[in-house]
């Protein structure tokens, strides 16, 4: 596996640099860089700073994705998942968090609030054409890979 260098700048309020929790982890854990506790009520959303800026190499993007444990236990997830960080962005990495749970949730400084995954992104060349090649699916099935999900349940919905 080839390694990619990600330059990271620690801001004064940073709790910890992003890091992999295990040797097989796909995402770098992002920690809350809060000065004080922050309580998020059900249905509310907030932008939580991580205290880091990154320099993503050209040809890559960083995706900010939720942590499954927070979602499973507390209904905490990200509003725009995945959140895309373009290679030319140099601002602070932040997590746009929402509480889909039934109870308020309190974030503390250093809590792991999301993950950052580096993804290779090719630059594409657009070619305008008059017609596209046909496919088995065609234009059917927006959002369902061409299947009629209601008929799959045979009236059990």
Image (cartoon, grey):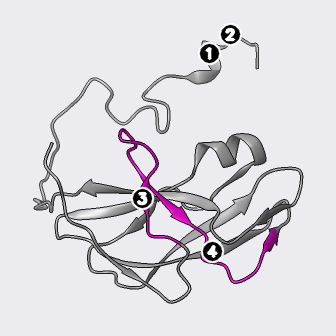
Q: CA distance from mark 3 to mark 2?
A: 47 Å
Relative to 24, is 136 above or below?
Answer: above
Q: CA distance from mark 3 to mark 1?
A: 45 Å
Q: Secondary structure at mark 2?
A: loop
Q: Earlier in the sequence, mark 4 or mark 2?
A: 4
Residue at the location (49% across, 22% down)? 147
Q: CA distance from mark 1 to mark 4?
A: 42 Å
Relative to 114, is 1 above or below?
Answer: above
Residue at the location (78% across, 75% down)? 37
**Label 3 packing within 10 angstroms: few (<14), some (14-19), many (20+):** some
The answer to which quarter of the image holds residue 157 is top right
Q: Which residue is mark 4?
A: 48
Q: Which residue is mark 3?
A: 19
Q: CA distance from mark 3 to mark 4?
A: 18 Å
Q: Secondary structure at mark 1?
A: helix
Q: Which mark is residue 143?
A: none
Query: Which is more foreground, mark 3 or mark 2?
Result: 3
Do the residues bearing badges 3 and 1 touch, measured as CB atoms within 8 Å?
A: no
Q: Which mark is residue 154?
A: 2
What is the count of numbered marks? 4
Residue at the location (68% across, 49% down)? 70
Q: In the rendered structure, does residue 29 fall within the stretch colored magenta?
A: yes
The answer to which quarter of the image holds residue 155 is top right
Expressed as whole percent of the image width and height from the top left, the position of residue 81 reads 52, 56
Give the residues in magenta: 16-39
Q: Earlier in the sequence, mark 3 or mark 2?
A: 3
Q: Which residue is mark 1?
A: 151
Relative to 140, is 125 above or below?
Answer: below
Query: Which is more foreground, mark 3 or mark 4?
Result: 3
State left or right for residue 120 relative to residue 30: left
Q: Nearer the viewer, residue 144 or 64?
A: 64
Q: Secondary structure at mark 3?
A: strand
């Amino acid at each position: 596996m080839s390694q990619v260098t990600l330059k990271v700048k620690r801001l004064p309020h940073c709790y910890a640099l992003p890091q992999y929790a295990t040797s097989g982890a796909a995402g770098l854990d992002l920690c809350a860089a809060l000065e004080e506790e922050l309580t998020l009520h059900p249905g509310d959303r907030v932008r939580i700073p991580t205290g880091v800026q990154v320099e993503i190499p050209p040809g890559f993007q960083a995706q900010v994705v939720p942590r499954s444990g927070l979602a499973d236990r507390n209904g905490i997830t990200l509003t725009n998942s995945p959140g895309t960080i373009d290679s030319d962005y140099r601002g602070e990495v932040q997590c746009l968090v929402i509480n889909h749970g039934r109870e308020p949730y309190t974030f503390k400084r250093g809590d792991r609030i999301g993950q950052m995954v580096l993804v290779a992104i090719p630059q594409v060349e657009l070619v305008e054409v008059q017609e596209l090649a046909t496919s088995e699916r065609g234009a059917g099935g927006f959002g369902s890979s061409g299947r009629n999900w209601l008929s799959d349940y045979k009236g059990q919905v």
